[in-house]
Amino acid sequence: MLIGEYPCIVDVKGRLNFPAKLREDLGERFLLSKGLGDRCLCVYSLEEWERRRQKLSSLPSAEMYALQRYLFSSAAEVEPDKQGRIVIPQVLRDFIQVERDVMVVGADNRCEIWTKKDWEETQQQLSPEYIRSLIQKAGF
């Protein structure tokens, strides 16, 4: 399970020192892709990426093709170097509009990479009332 919040820096070459704890859980190589519905990047283990790819194939063709183009065209398989750094491709850095400060967060079966500003704004939107409504919908 991928958990926690980790403030990180993306350097001018697009390198990010990916948190060691998350690297351990994701494996030696993992995938980066655009977030679904949010301006963040999603980080998947190779196994989780395959599960999601298979789920896509169950959609009607037009929807499947649209999502495949969206996700696969800019997805990147990454392997951390000896210092634990990954390179975020330019197309993905542009997508989240990263300049320097990011938050890498664990989100159960994936991680997310947010600009620090967007992460803070997202967290402010999670009011206690909204969380209560989600808990009720989930049947907790």
Image (tube, grey):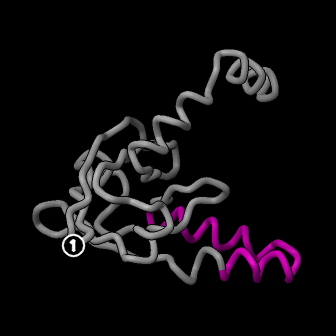
Residue at disc 1, secondary structure: loop
The disc labelled 1 sits on which kind of residue? Lys
Q: Is residue 115 left or right of residue 58?
A: left
Image position, residue 107 (x, y; %) = 50, 43
Image position, residue 120 (x, y; %) = 46, 35
Q: Depth check: give the residue in front, 94 or 111.
A: 94
Farthest left residue?
A: 82
Q: Residue at x 83, y 75 (%)?
A: 63
Q: Is residue 21 visible?
A: yes
Q: Depth check: give the residue in front, 42 or 51.
A: 42
Image position, residue 101 (x, y; %) = 30, 49
Residue count near mark 1 (Cα–Cα under 10 Å), binned few <14, some 14–19, many ≥20: few
Residue 59 appears in which quarter of the rendering? bottom right
Q: From what the image shows, is residue 36 above or below residue 13?
A: above
Q: Quadrant of the N terminus?
A: top left
Tally the marks.
1
Q: Is residue 8 left or right of residue 44?
A: left
Q: Depth check: give the residue in front, 3 or 28.
A: 3
Q: Is residue 31 visible?
A: no
Q: From what the image shows, is residue 38 above or below residue 73?
A: above
Q: Is residue 54 magenta?
A: yes
Q: Residue at x 56, y 56 (%)?
A: 39
Q: From what the image shows, is residue 30 above or below residue 26?
A: below
Q: Is residue 89 magenta?
A: no
Q: Which residue is mark 1?
A: 13
Q: Quadrant of the C terminus?
A: top right
Span colored in magenta: 44-69
Q: From what the image shows, is residue 49 above or below residue 37?
A: below
Q: Residue at x 39, y 67 (%)?
A: 30
